[in-house]
Amino acid sequence: MNKPLILAGLLTLLAPAAWADGHAAFEENCASCHGADAEGIEGLAPPLHNADLWKALGDNRQAYIAGVVTGGMSGTLQSKGTTYEGLVMPPLGYLDTATLVEITQYVLRDVNQVGDGPSAALITQYQASPPEHAALRKLRNGG
């Protein structure tokens, strides 16, 4: 009996499928602006690997990330000491609900270790009526 092979097989079965799907979906749809490691690209897009931000958002983190992926983001943001001006992130309306859930789960749970991302119900709600960018910036800034 090959114990390492059995252990590897069990770990594969126990690993969350959403991580692999979320990571792949992030790389395909988000990494070109936010970086493959989610550390952002200065002058282009802020880091999503920013546990301090997500922790500060607290119970609002799911609403914030759901609003950004469904409605996009524009304006000026501060992140990790850098100002991002003229920021324009388009809504990810070309992605289905399940993919948006996978991406947001990956960013919050796997990259930042701050808990789960938004539910499919919240993503669907915001797809129908995304929050205004000003409201998202206010939420991000603690308002």
Image (cartoon, rainbow, N blue to C red):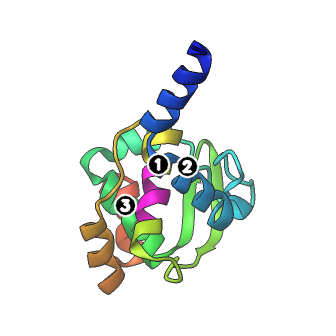
Identity, as a three-letter code, of the amino acid under mark 3: Tyr
Residue for badge 1: 17
Q: Earlier in the sequence, mark 2 or mark 3?
A: 2
Q: Residue at x 40, y 62 (%)?
A: 101
Q: Residue at x 57, y 48 (%)?
A: 79
Mark 1 and mark 3 lie on one chain; the one further toward the N terminus is: 1
| Kind of element beneath mark 1 | helix
Tell me if mark 2 has few (under 14), some (14-19) or many (20+) residues whose alpha carbon lies within 10 angstroms of its own.
some
Marks 1/3: CA–CA distance: 24 Å
State which region is magenta: 100-105
> Residue 119: x and y, percent?
28, 60
| Residue 137 visible to an observer of this rendering | no
Q: Amino acid at mark 1?
A: Ala
Q: Which residue is mark 2?
A: 20
Q: Which residue appears farthest toward the front when viewing the image? A: 1
Residue that appears at 53% across and 30% down: 9
Residue 22's place in the image compared with 29, above or below, is above
What amino acid type should be assigned to the residue bearing mark 2? Ala
For image coordinates 62% across by 43% down, the residue present is 81
The reply to whether the C-beta atoms of the residues labelled 1 and 2 are less than 8 Å apart is: yes
Residue 98: image quadrant is: bottom left
Q: Nearer the viewer, residue 4 or 14?
A: 4
Circle 3 is placed at which residue position? Answer: 64
Relative to 111, does residue 86 appear above or below in the rendering? below
